[in-house]
Image (cartoon, rainbow, N blue to C red):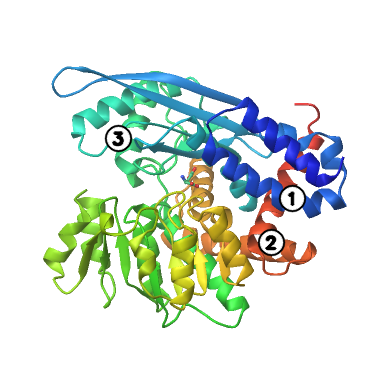
């Protein structure tokens, strides 16, 4: 059977055996397709059935989460933890609380996490979890009761050398705190079982900033290789959560001007540059809607998202040199990338997980745009989570500069490994190809070493 047919066969059987998981198929198809040149060169992956194995999680846990709302009424949500691959280390990956969460979404995120974690060069396997619970509009008490109930089940499956969850969309320091407290109450153990913890109780300096900072470091590496930099460049950013916020802050440090951000209701275009402190106090501290921004900065424009044709994202209609999708999956489609490109954009760097649709990625590659794929570009968050685990295990606390230094080194290594691998497989500079192959190779070789498991 030709390699193409082999890949096709695995894709088809994945779709047949796990119906209705669109985002998961999208993630699998991208990875498997880019493995073609590796599989041509190395028959061992086929001989050891690696593709068939790697698309099936080692374990997936689905559970009922019941909690009492402020009216004393019983509410019900679904909880998930997909422990995808532990070939290179204990399961590691975030928890997402968002109404759009279903098993297919968690599986796509878990699958991506395997290769992202491998690229960091650290010993962490891939996992993801979450719930269709929406923290938005809930009281502190409701969020706490939900988190505690979620942890009652999750605690049976995690541990500092077993599975170490963290945050993702809808899960920040507050939720990690409530879950950590409950874990401790249930098990009696004060251990580094979650990352993204508060600084007083085991958290690492620079973890909050790490995904956004890392994303910008990655983009800078791409541009430096081409003899350019972010300095003086106008950039667009989508989202206004943890990743977007610290992307914006680091862009200023690099001498660039981030002019946009967005939430689920609308976007801000501030041509003087988004004010970091205002954004932080509205979104991170205040948990308010982005429209508040124009009260403090009346010269900025607020554009409700529904004013734009369905499927496109208003953020990508703003001219820029570099775009940083940092909100969520499939937020940058073919029409968006054409808009960006025609307006002079040359770099797309993915802070969110799988934010670009496959046809948008094809367009970037066909037009030789610079492209920082999510697995590589946003790996700084999970890498710094591993630095938090190291500090917990050795009972140390490193300075901000020490962690940030390590983060910069890791992002540079990921870039160089992805670049070198793209060259090895005949498409120099195609970082999607390089990242997928390099991330896969380490995991697959480890699976071979460990036998039929
Ligand atoms: N949710 C983040 C990611 O997508 C971070 C995971 C972690 O720190 O474990 O990589």
Pointer 1 and pointer 3: residues touching (CB < 8 Å)? Answer: no
C-alpha gap between disc 3 and disc 2: 38 Å
Mark 2 sits on what residue?
Answer: 417
Q: Dot 2 lies on which element? A: helix
Tally the numbered discs.
Answer: 3
| 289, 363: nearer the viewer | 363
Distance from label 2 to label 1 (Cα)? 16 Å
Q: Nearer the viewer, residue 99 or 148?
A: 99
Tell me the crowding category of disc 3: few under 14, some 14 to 19, or many 20 or more residues within 10 angstroms, Cα based. some
In the picture of the structure, the residue carrying the numbered disc 3 is 134
* In contact (CB < 8 Å): disc 3 and disc 2: no
The image quadrant of residue 424 is bottom right
Find disc 1 in the rendering and name its residue: 35
Image point (78%, 32%), residue name: 450
Earlier along the polypeptide chain: callout 1 or callout 3? 1
Q: Position of residue 265 (x, y in %)?
A: 25, 52
The reply to whether residue 410 is visible in this rendering is no
- State which quadrant residue 24 falls in: top right
- Quadrant containing the C terminus is top right
- Residue 208: x, y in percent? 38, 52
């Amino acid at each position: 059977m030709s390699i193409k047919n082999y890949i096709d066969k695995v894709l088809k059987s994945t779709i047949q055996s796990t119906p209705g998981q669109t985002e998961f198929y999208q993630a699998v198809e991208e990875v498997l397709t880019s493995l073609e040149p590796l599989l041509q060169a190395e028959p061992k992956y086929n001989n050891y059935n690696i593709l068939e194995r790697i698309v099936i999680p080692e374990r997936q846990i689905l559970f009922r989460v019941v909690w009492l709302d402020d009216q004393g009424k019983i509410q019900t949500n679904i909880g998930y933890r997909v422990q995808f691959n532990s070939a290179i280390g204990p399961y590691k990956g975030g928890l997402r609380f968002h109404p759009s969460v279903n098993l297919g979404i968690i599986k796509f995120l878990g699958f991506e996490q395997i290769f992202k974690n491998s690229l960091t060069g650290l010993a962490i396997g891939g996992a993801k979890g979450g719930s269709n619970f929406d923290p938005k509009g809930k009281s502190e008490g409701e969020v706490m009761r939900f988190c505690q109930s979620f942890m009652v089940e999750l605690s049976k499956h995690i541990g500092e050398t077993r599975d170490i969850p963290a945050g993702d969309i809808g899960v920040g320091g507050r939720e990690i705190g409530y879950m950590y407290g409950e874990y401790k109450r249930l098990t009696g153990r004060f251990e580094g079982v979650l990352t993204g913890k508060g600084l007083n109780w085991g958290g690492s300096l620079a973890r909050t900033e790490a995904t956004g900072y890392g994303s910008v470091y990655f983009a800078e590496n791409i541009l430096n290789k081409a003899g350019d930099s972010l300095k003086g460049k106008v950039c667009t950013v989508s989202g206004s959560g943890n990743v977007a916020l610290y992307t914006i802050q680091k862009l200023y440090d690099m001498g660039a001007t981030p002019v946009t951000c967005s939430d689920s209701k609308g976007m801000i275009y501030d041509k003087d540059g988004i004010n970091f402190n205002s954004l932080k106090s509205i979104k991170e501290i205040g948990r308010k809607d982005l429209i508040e921004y124009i009260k403090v900065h009346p010269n900025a424009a607020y554009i409700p998202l529904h004013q734009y044709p369905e499927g496109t994202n208003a953020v990508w209609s703003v001219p820029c040199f570099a775009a940083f999708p940092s909100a969520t999956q499939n937020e940058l489609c073919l029409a968006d990338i054409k808009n960006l490109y025609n307006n002079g954009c040359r770099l797309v760097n993915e802070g969110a997980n799988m934010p670009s649709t496959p046809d948008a990625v094809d367009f970037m590659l066909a037009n030789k745009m610079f492209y920082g794929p999510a697995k590589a570009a946003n790996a700084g968050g999970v890498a710094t989570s591993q630095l938090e685990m190291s500090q917990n295990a050795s009972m140390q606390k490193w300075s901000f500069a020490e962690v940030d230094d390590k983060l910069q080194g890791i992002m540079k290594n990921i870039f160089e490994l992805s670049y070198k691998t793209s060259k090895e497989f005949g498409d120099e500079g195609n970082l999607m190809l390089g990242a997928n192959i390099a991330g896969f190779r380490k995991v697959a070789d480890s699976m071979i070493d460990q036998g039929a498991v």
